[in-house]
Amino acid sequence: MEEILEKFETALIAGNADASADLADAIVAAGQATADEIFAHLSNAMEEVGSRYQTGEYFIPEMLRSAEAVEKAMAVLEPYLFESRHEQAGVVVMGTVRGDIHNIGKNIIVSALRAAGYEVHDLGVNVSTEKFVNKVRETGAGLLLLSAFTTSTKPALLDVMAALEAEGLRGSVKVVSGGASHSEKFAREVGVDGFATDVKSTLAVCRRLTGRDGDRR
Ligand code: B12
Protein backbone atom coordinates (compact mmCIF):
# COMPACT_ATOMS: atom_id res chain seq x y z
CA MET A 1 0.00 0.00 0.00
CA GLU A 2 2.81 2.36 0.96
CA GLU A 3 4.22 2.02 -2.56
CA ILE A 4 0.96 3.19 -4.17
CA LEU A 5 0.76 6.11 -1.74
CA GLU A 6 4.36 7.11 -2.57
CA LYS A 7 3.58 6.98 -6.30
CA PHE A 8 0.43 9.01 -5.64
CA GLU A 9 2.48 11.67 -3.85
CA THR A 10 4.99 11.77 -6.73
CA ALA A 11 2.21 12.17 -9.31
CA LEU A 12 0.73 15.08 -7.35
CA ILE A 13 4.12 16.79 -7.13
CA ALA A 14 4.61 16.28 -10.88
CA GLY A 15 1.17 17.78 -11.51
CA ASN A 16 0.10 14.69 -13.46
CA ALA A 17 -3.69 14.77 -13.03
CA ASP A 18 -4.39 11.56 -14.99
CA ALA A 19 -1.84 9.51 -13.05
CA SER A 20 -3.08 11.02 -9.77
CA ALA A 21 -6.65 10.01 -10.55
CA ASP A 22 -5.54 6.49 -11.62
CA LEU A 23 -3.52 6.07 -8.43
CA ALA A 24 -6.46 7.34 -6.39
CA ASP A 25 -8.51 4.60 -8.08
CA ALA A 26 -5.85 2.07 -7.06
CA ILE A 27 -5.95 3.33 -3.46
CA VAL A 28 -9.73 2.92 -3.39
CA ALA A 29 -9.53 -0.55 -5.01
CA ALA A 30 -6.96 -1.74 -2.45
CA GLY A 31 -9.16 -0.37 0.33
CA GLN A 32 -6.40 -0.41 2.92
CA ALA A 33 -5.23 3.17 3.33
CA THR A 34 -6.66 5.17 6.22
CA ALA A 35 -7.89 8.76 5.81
CA ASP A 36 -4.93 9.93 7.94
CA GLU A 37 -2.44 8.24 5.60
CA ILE A 38 -4.06 9.69 2.50
CA PHE A 39 -4.14 13.23 3.90
CA ALA A 40 -0.53 12.94 5.07
CA HIS A 41 0.61 12.12 1.53
CA LEU A 42 -1.56 14.87 0.01
CA SER A 43 -0.13 17.44 2.43
CA ASN A 44 3.45 16.25 1.90
CA ALA A 45 3.01 16.58 -1.84
CA MET A 46 1.66 20.11 -1.68
CA GLU A 47 4.27 21.19 0.84
CA GLU A 48 6.92 19.94 -1.57
CA VAL A 49 5.27 21.89 -4.41
CA GLY A 50 5.26 25.01 -2.19
CA SER A 51 8.93 24.67 -1.36
CA ARG A 52 9.87 24.06 -5.02
CA TYR A 53 8.05 27.32 -5.82
CA GLN A 54 9.92 29.14 -3.10
CA THR A 55 13.29 27.88 -4.32
CA GLY A 56 12.49 28.87 -7.90
CA GLU A 57 12.29 25.31 -9.23
CA TYR A 58 8.54 25.60 -9.84
CA PHE A 59 6.57 28.53 -11.24
CA ILE A 60 2.87 29.35 -11.15
CA PRO A 61 1.86 26.97 -14.02
CA GLU A 62 3.47 23.99 -12.23
CA MET A 63 1.62 24.88 -9.01
CA LEU A 64 -1.66 25.13 -10.85
CA ARG A 65 -1.09 21.72 -12.46
CA SER A 66 -0.52 20.20 -9.02
CA ALA A 67 -3.66 21.93 -7.74
CA GLU A 68 -5.63 20.35 -10.59
CA ALA A 69 -4.11 16.94 -9.82
CA VAL A 70 -5.27 17.28 -6.18
CA GLU A 71 -8.75 18.19 -7.36
CA LYS A 72 -9.04 15.20 -9.71
CA ALA A 73 -7.70 12.81 -7.07
CA MET A 74 -10.05 14.15 -4.41
CA ALA A 75 -13.05 13.61 -6.68
CA VAL A 76 -12.13 9.90 -6.70
CA LEU A 77 -11.15 9.67 -3.03
CA GLU A 78 -13.97 11.58 -1.35
CA PRO A 79 -16.63 8.82 -1.54
CA TYR A 80 -14.06 6.33 -0.19
CA LEU A 81 -13.09 8.66 2.65
CA PHE A 82 -16.74 9.18 3.55
CA GLU A 83 -17.19 5.45 4.04
CA SER A 84 -15.25 5.74 7.27
CA ARG A 85 -17.74 8.27 8.56
CA HIS A 86 -19.98 6.94 11.32
CA GLU A 87 -21.76 9.92 12.79
CA GLN A 88 -22.63 13.51 12.06
CA ALA A 89 -19.96 15.49 13.84
CA GLY A 90 -21.35 19.00 13.32
CA VAL A 91 -22.06 21.67 10.74
CA VAL A 92 -19.18 23.72 9.37
CA VAL A 93 -19.05 26.74 7.07
CA MET A 94 -15.67 27.22 5.43
CA GLY A 95 -14.07 29.46 2.82
CA THR A 96 -11.03 31.51 1.88
CA VAL A 97 -11.51 35.13 2.88
CA ARG A 98 -11.99 38.15 0.63
CA GLY A 99 -8.97 39.10 -1.48
CA ASP A 100 -7.41 35.64 -1.29
CA ILE A 101 -7.72 32.95 -3.95
CA HIS A 102 -5.57 30.14 -2.51
CA ASN A 103 -7.66 26.97 -2.24
CA ILE A 104 -5.44 23.87 -2.11
CA GLY A 105 -5.03 23.84 1.67
CA LYS A 106 -8.66 24.81 2.17
CA ASN A 107 -9.84 21.96 -0.05
CA ILE A 108 -7.73 19.47 1.87
CA ILE A 109 -9.27 20.64 5.15
CA VAL A 110 -12.79 20.49 3.65
CA SER A 111 -12.21 16.88 2.57
CA ALA A 112 -10.67 15.92 5.91
CA LEU A 113 -13.62 17.40 7.81
CA ARG A 114 -16.11 15.63 5.56
CA ALA A 115 -14.23 12.37 6.03
CA ALA A 116 -14.43 12.96 9.79
CA GLY A 117 -18.21 13.27 9.58
CA TYR A 118 -18.78 17.02 9.47
CA GLU A 119 -21.35 18.52 7.14
CA VAL A 120 -19.22 21.14 5.38
CA HIS A 121 -20.56 24.08 3.40
CA ASP A 122 -17.62 25.14 1.27
CA LEU A 123 -18.07 28.70 0.02
CA GLY A 124 -14.95 28.68 -2.17
CA VAL A 125 -12.41 31.48 -2.40
CA ASN A 126 -12.50 35.29 -2.19
CA VAL A 127 -15.60 35.00 0.00
CA SER A 128 -17.27 38.21 1.18
CA THR A 129 -18.12 38.83 4.83
CA GLU A 130 -21.79 38.93 3.93
CA LYS A 131 -21.64 35.47 2.34
CA PHE A 132 -19.97 33.97 5.43
CA VAL A 133 -22.46 35.56 7.82
CA ASN A 134 -25.50 34.58 5.74
CA LYS A 135 -24.34 30.97 5.45
CA VAL A 136 -23.68 30.67 9.19
CA ARG A 137 -27.17 32.01 9.90
CA GLU A 138 -28.85 29.83 7.26
CA THR A 139 -27.14 26.55 8.26
CA GLY A 140 -26.94 27.09 12.01
CA ALA A 141 -23.28 26.06 11.79
CA GLY A 142 -21.44 25.63 15.06
CA LEU A 143 -18.07 26.18 13.38
CA LEU A 144 -16.82 28.77 10.91
CA LEU A 145 -13.43 28.00 9.38
CA LEU A 146 -11.60 30.83 7.67
CA SER A 147 -8.67 30.17 5.37
CA ALA A 148 -6.26 33.07 4.93
CA PHE A 149 -2.95 32.59 3.12
CA THR A 150 -1.63 36.10 2.59
CA THR A 151 -0.95 38.43 5.52
CA SER A 152 -2.88 41.20 3.74
CA THR A 153 -6.09 39.32 4.61
CA LYS A 154 -6.14 40.65 8.17
CA PRO A 155 -8.77 43.37 7.50
CA ALA A 156 -11.02 40.78 5.82
CA LEU A 157 -10.76 38.46 8.86
CA LEU A 158 -11.45 41.32 11.27
CA ASP A 159 -14.44 42.31 9.17
CA VAL A 160 -15.96 38.80 9.45
CA MET A 161 -15.46 38.83 13.24
CA ALA A 162 -17.09 42.27 13.58
CA ALA A 163 -20.04 41.26 11.37
CA LEU A 164 -20.70 38.08 13.39
CA GLU A 165 -20.75 40.20 16.53
CA ALA A 166 -23.01 42.84 14.97
CA GLU A 167 -25.44 40.17 13.72
CA GLY A 168 -25.65 38.51 17.15
CA LEU A 169 -24.06 35.28 15.90
CA ARG A 170 -20.75 35.43 17.73
CA GLY A 171 -22.10 33.56 20.77
CA SER A 172 -23.26 30.56 18.78
CA VAL A 173 -20.44 29.97 16.32
CA LYS A 174 -16.82 29.13 17.08
CA VAL A 175 -14.37 30.60 14.61
CA VAL A 176 -11.14 28.88 13.60
CA SER A 177 -8.57 30.30 11.20
CA GLY A 178 -5.51 28.93 9.46
CA GLY A 179 -3.43 28.92 6.31
CA ALA A 180 0.12 29.58 5.17
CA SER A 181 1.77 32.73 6.53
CA HIS A 182 -0.77 32.72 9.32
CA SER A 183 0.67 32.53 12.82
CA GLU A 184 -0.87 31.93 16.21
CA LYS A 185 -0.10 35.57 17.08
CA PHE A 186 -1.92 36.72 13.92
CA ALA A 187 -4.93 34.54 14.85
CA ARG A 188 -4.95 35.94 18.38
CA GLU A 189 -4.93 39.49 17.05
CA VAL A 190 -7.93 38.67 14.85
CA GLY A 191 -9.74 37.24 17.88
CA VAL A 192 -10.70 33.79 16.60
CA ASP A 193 -11.41 30.90 18.99
CA GLY A 194 -8.87 28.53 17.48
CA PHE A 195 -5.97 28.26 15.08
CA ALA A 196 -4.35 25.23 13.44
CA THR A 197 -1.66 24.47 10.91
CA ASP A 198 -2.47 21.11 9.35
CA VAL A 199 -5.14 18.42 9.02
CA LYS A 200 -4.40 16.76 12.34
CA SER A 201 -4.35 19.93 14.43
CA THR A 202 -7.42 21.30 12.63
CA LEU A 203 -9.46 18.19 13.44
CA ALA A 204 -8.26 18.37 17.05
CA VAL A 205 -9.24 22.06 17.40
CA CYS A 206 -12.66 21.42 15.85
CA ARG A 207 -13.28 18.51 18.19
CA ARG A 208 -12.17 20.57 21.20
CA LEU A 209 -14.34 23.55 20.29
CA THR A 210 -17.49 21.58 19.59
CA GLY A 211 -17.15 18.75 22.07
CA ARG A 212 -18.45 16.75 19.08
CA ASP A 213 -21.80 18.51 19.33
CA GLY A 214 -21.04 21.96 17.96
CA ASP A 215 -24.09 21.87 15.75
CA ARG A 216 -26.79 24.24 16.97
CA ARG A 217 -29.54 22.66 14.91
C1 B12 B 1 0.20 27.42 -4.52
C2 B12 B 1 0.39 28.89 -4.16
C3 B12 B 1 -0.25 29.83 -4.95
C4 B12 B 1 -1.19 29.44 -6.11
C5 B12 B 1 -2.55 29.05 -5.50
C6 B12 B 1 -3.25 27.97 -6.32
C7 B12 B 1 -4.47 27.47 -5.61
N1 B12 B 1 -5.40 26.93 -6.41
O1 B12 B 1 -4.60 27.52 -4.41
C8 B12 B 1 -1.26 30.78 -6.93
C9 B12 B 1 -0.21 30.68 -8.01
C10 B12 B 1 -2.60 31.12 -7.56
C11 B12 B 1 -0.83 31.80 -5.87
C12 B12 B 1 -1.09 33.16 -5.97
C13 B12 B 1 -0.58 34.10 -5.09
N2 B12 B 1 0.23 33.88 -4.04
CO1 B12 B 1 0.64 32.13 -3.36
N3 B12 B 1 1.35 30.55 -2.71
C14 B12 B 1 1.21 29.29 -3.04
C15 B12 B 1 2.14 28.41 -2.18
C16 B12 B 1 3.43 28.14 -2.98
C17 B12 B 1 1.61 27.08 -1.73
C18 B12 B 1 0.24 27.14 -1.03
C19 B12 B 1 -0.27 25.73 -0.87
O2 B12 B 1 -1.14 25.29 -1.60
N4 B12 B 1 0.34 24.98 0.06
C20 B12 B 1 0.03 23.57 0.31
C21 B12 B 1 -1.17 23.44 1.25
C22 B12 B 1 -1.44 21.94 1.52
O3 B12 B 1 -0.78 24.04 2.46
P1 B12 B 1 -1.58 25.26 3.07
O4 B12 B 1 -2.14 26.09 2.00
O5 B12 B 1 -0.68 25.93 4.04
O6 B12 B 1 -2.78 24.57 3.85
C23 B12 B 1 -2.57 23.79 5.01
C24 B12 B 1 -2.58 24.60 6.29
O7 B12 B 1 -2.27 25.96 6.12
C25 B12 B 1 -3.93 24.36 6.88
N5 B12 B 1 -5.05 25.23 6.54
C26 B12 B 1 -5.38 25.77 5.36
N6 B12 B 1 -6.52 26.49 5.47
C27 B12 B 1 -6.91 26.39 6.74
C28 B12 B 1 -8.02 26.93 7.39
C29 B12 B 1 -8.23 26.68 8.73
C30 B12 B 1 -9.42 27.25 9.41
C31 B12 B 1 -7.29 25.88 9.44
C32 B12 B 1 -7.49 25.64 10.88
C33 B12 B 1 -6.15 25.34 8.79
C34 B12 B 1 -5.99 25.61 7.45
O8 B12 B 1 -4.21 23.06 6.47
C35 B12 B 1 -3.75 22.84 5.13
C36 B12 B 1 -3.42 21.36 4.97
O9 B12 B 1 -2.29 21.00 5.72
C37 B12 B 1 2.41 29.35 -0.96
C38 B12 B 1 3.73 29.13 -0.23
C39 B12 B 1 3.62 28.15 0.88
N7 B12 B 1 4.72 27.53 1.17
O10 B12 B 1 2.58 27.98 1.47
C40 B12 B 1 2.32 30.74 -1.62
C41 B12 B 1 1.90 31.96 -0.78
C42 B12 B 1 0.75 31.62 0.15
N8 B12 B 1 1.46 32.90 -1.82
C43 B12 B 1 1.85 34.10 -1.59
C44 B12 B 1 1.57 35.21 -2.43
C45 B12 B 1 2.20 36.52 -2.05
C46 B12 B 1 0.75 35.07 -3.58
C47 B12 B 1 0.37 36.16 -4.56
C48 B12 B 1 0.07 37.54 -3.98
C49 B12 B 1 1.49 36.18 -5.61
C50 B12 B 1 1.44 37.31 -6.61
N9 B12 B 1 2.41 38.17 -6.46
O11 B12 B 1 0.56 37.36 -7.42
C51 B12 B 1 -0.88 35.57 -5.24
C52 B12 B 1 -2.13 35.92 -4.41
C53 B12 B 1 -3.37 35.86 -5.16
C54 B12 B 1 -4.51 36.09 -4.20
N10 B12 B 1 -5.18 37.21 -4.32
O12 B12 B 1 -4.78 35.27 -3.34
C55 B12 B 1 2.63 34.23 -0.29
C56 B12 B 1 1.90 34.90 0.86
C57 B12 B 1 2.86 35.77 1.62
C58 B12 B 1 2.23 36.60 2.67
N11 B12 B 1 2.89 36.64 3.81
O13 B12 B 1 1.24 37.23 2.51
C59 B12 B 1 3.08 32.75 -0.05
C60 B12 B 1 3.26 32.37 1.42
C61 B12 B 1 4.42 32.55 -0.84
C62 B12 B 1 5.54 33.41 -0.31
N12 B12 B 1 6.34 32.93 0.57
O14 B12 B 1 5.68 34.54 -0.74
N13 B12 B 1 -0.16 31.21 -4.85
Image: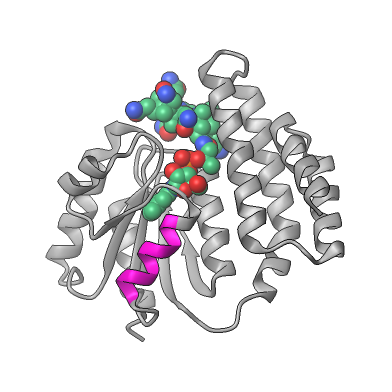
**Residue drawn at point x = 26 percent, y = 44 percent:** 184
**Residue drawn at point x = 32 percent, y = 52 percent:** 177
Image coordinates of residue 72 in percent, x first then y, are 73, 48
Q: Is residue 157 left or right of residue 168?
A: right
Query: Along the line of sight, which residue is nearer the eye, 201 or 189?
Result: 201
Q: Is residue 108 left or right of residue 158?
A: right
* Image position of 5 with respect to 208: above or below: above
Magenta stretch: give its range.
201-210
**Residue drawn at point x = 76 percent, y = 42 percent:** 6
Q: Residue furthest top?
A: 56
Is residue 125 visible in this depiction of the protein? no
* Image position of 148 with respect to 133: above or below: above
**Residue drawn at point x = 29 percent, y = 39 percent:** 183
Residue 217 falls in image quadrant:
bottom left
The image quadrant where one finds the N terminus is bottom right
* Image position of 10 with respect to 203: above or below: above
Residue 212 falls in image quadrant:
bottom left
Query: Would you say the magenta stretch is mainly helix, strand or loop?
Result: helix
Residue 66 falls in image quadrant:
top right
Is residue 29 visible in this depiction of the protein? yes
Q: Is residue 87 left or right of residue 94?
A: right
The type of colouring in the image is one colour
Q: Residue furthest left?
A: 166
Image coordinates of residue 200 in percent, x first then y, are 48, 57
Q: How many marks?
A: 0
Q: Residue furthest bottom?
A: 217
Image coordinates of residue 155 in percent, x first then y, are 21, 40
**Within the magenta stretch, is there residue 57?**
no
Image coordinates of residue 110 in percent, x first then y, are 52, 59
